[in-house]
Image (spheres, helix red, strand yellow):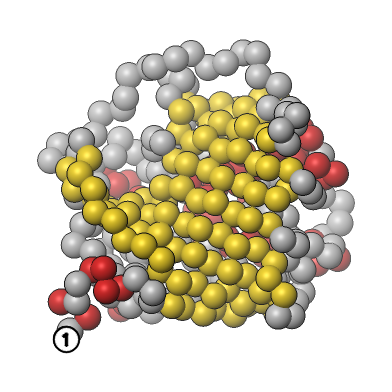
C-alpha cells in the first residue's frame, strides 16, 4: 500500500534515529541570539544549558523534499496528514543529566499517538512524539512533543481582544521584542524553513496570521532564560522537568511580557509570556529536584 494511502493511525510506532555532536560553537551562537553574556565560550564549558538541544539533532532535508509550508514533506517519519497548518502545541521534558558539550549523542524518536478532535475552528489532528537522548549509552533527557494540525482559516485571523492586564506584582519580569533578525537567526540555528517565521506574504495571505510568528521553542527558551537570570545556575542546574504549552501566537516586533515566579515550596517555578494586551501566548513550569 502507498504510504499516502495508509490509515493515519498505522503510523503510530514509526521510528527515527538522529546522531549529532553537541557543539559549543552552536551554543555560542544561540547565546548571542538570546543576548546571554558569557565570558567563557561554550566550547570550553562542560554542559549544554536546558532546551538548547533544539539546535541539535537536525535531520537535513533536501530542498526537493520540502512541502509548500517549508517543513519537510509529510509521509516519511511523520504521517501525510491532509491538514496544512502545523503548530508545536506543547512539550514535556525530563532531565536526567546535562548533555555534554563536545560528545557525540543520539536522539531516538518514536511516534506514540495520533488523535483526531473537533475544535471551534474545525478538525484538529494531534500527533505525539517521544524523544530519548543518549550519550555514551546513558539516557540524558526524555522529551514528549505534541504537534497539532489544522486547516487554513476561511478568513484572516483577527488578533484576540484583551482578556486581562499584564501583572505588575510578579516575582521576576522582563520584556522582549523578537524582531525579524532574531527569528532569522533562530531559524538558521535550528535549520527551520517553516515559512511562518520569515515569509510575510505566505504567513498573512496563506496561513492568515496577522504577522510573522515567533517560534514556540524560541519563546520557551526565552522563558527559561528569564529563570536563569533571576534564579541563577544553582537552581537551574537542578531542573528535573520542564513543561510548556503554546496558547496563542506571538507576533514579530511586538513586545512580550515574560514573568517568572520564585521557587515555590512544592519545588515549582511558574513562567508565562503575554503580549501587550495581556493575552497569554505561552505558559510553562519547571520542577526542581
Left/right of residue 260 with respect to residue 244 in the rendered view: right
Using the rendered view, name the quadrant where residue 4 is placed.
Answer: bottom left
Residue 109 seen in this snapshot: yes
Horizontal and vertical percent for residue 66?
32, 71
Query: Callout 1: helix, strand or loop?
Result: loop
Q: Residue at x 65, y 49 (%)?
A: 241
Residue lying at the far front of the rendered structure: 266
Q: Is residue 251 above or below residue 105?
A: above
Left/right of residue 167 with respect to residue 254 in the rendered view: right
Q: Residue at x 19, y 72 (%)?
A: 7
Residue under label 1: 1
Horizontal and vertical percent for residue 246?
44, 41
Q: Is residue 8 above or below residue 181?
A: below
In the picture, which quadrant includes the N terminus? Answer: bottom left
Q: Nearer the viewer, residue 197 or 17?
A: 17
Q: Residue at x 36, y 51 (%)?
A: 87
Amino acid at each position: 500500500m502507498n504510504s499516502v494511502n495508509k490509515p493515519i493511525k498505522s503510523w503510530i510506532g514509526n521510528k527515527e534515529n538522529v546522531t549529532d555532536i553537541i557543539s559549543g560553537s552552536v551554543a555560542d551562537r544561540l547565546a548571542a541570539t538570546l543576548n546571554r553574556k558569557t565570558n567563557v565560550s561554550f566550547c570550553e564549558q562542560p554542559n549544554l544549558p536546558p532546551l538548547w538541544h533544539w539546535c541539535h539533532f537536525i535531520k537535513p532535508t533536501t530542498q526537493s523534499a520540502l512541502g509548500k509550508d517549508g517543513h519537510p514533506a509529510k509521509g516519511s517519519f511523520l504521517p501525510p496528514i491532509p491538514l496544512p497548518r502545523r503548530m508545536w502545541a506543547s512539550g514535556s521534558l525530563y532531565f536526567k543529566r546535562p548533555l555534554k558539550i563536545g560528545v557525540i549523542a543520539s536522539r531516538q524518536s518514536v511516534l506514540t499517538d495520533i488523535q483526531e478532535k473537533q475544535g471551534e475552528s474545525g478538525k484538529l489532528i494531534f500527533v505525539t512524539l517521544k524523544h530519548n537522548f543518549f550519550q555514551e549509552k546513558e539516557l540524558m533527557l526524555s522529551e514528549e512533543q505534541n504537534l497539532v494540525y489544522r486547516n487554513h482559516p476561511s478568513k484572516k485571523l483577527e488578533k484576540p481582544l484583551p482578556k486581562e492586564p499584564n501583572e505588575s506584582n510578579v516575582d521576576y519580569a522582563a520584556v522582549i521584542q523578537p524582531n525579524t533578525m532574531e527569528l532569522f537567526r533562530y531559524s538558521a540555528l535550528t535549520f527551520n524553513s517553516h515559512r511562518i517565521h520569515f515569509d510575510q506574504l505566505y504567513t498573512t495571505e496563506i496561513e492568515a496570521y496577522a504577522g510573522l510568528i515567533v517560534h514556540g521553542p524560541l519563546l520557551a527558551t526565552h522563558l527559561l532564560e528569564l529563570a536563569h537570570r533571576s534564579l541563577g545556575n544553582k537552581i537551574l542546574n537542578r531542573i528535573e522537568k520542564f513543561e510548556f504549552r503554546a496558547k496563542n501566537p506571538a507576533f514579530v516586533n511586538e513586545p512580550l511580557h515574560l514573568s517568572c515566579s520564585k521557587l515555590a515550596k512544592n519545588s515549582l517555578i511558574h513562567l508565562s509570556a503575554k503580549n501587550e494586551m495581556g493575552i497569554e501566548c505561552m505558559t510553562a513550569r519547571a520542577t526542581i529536584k
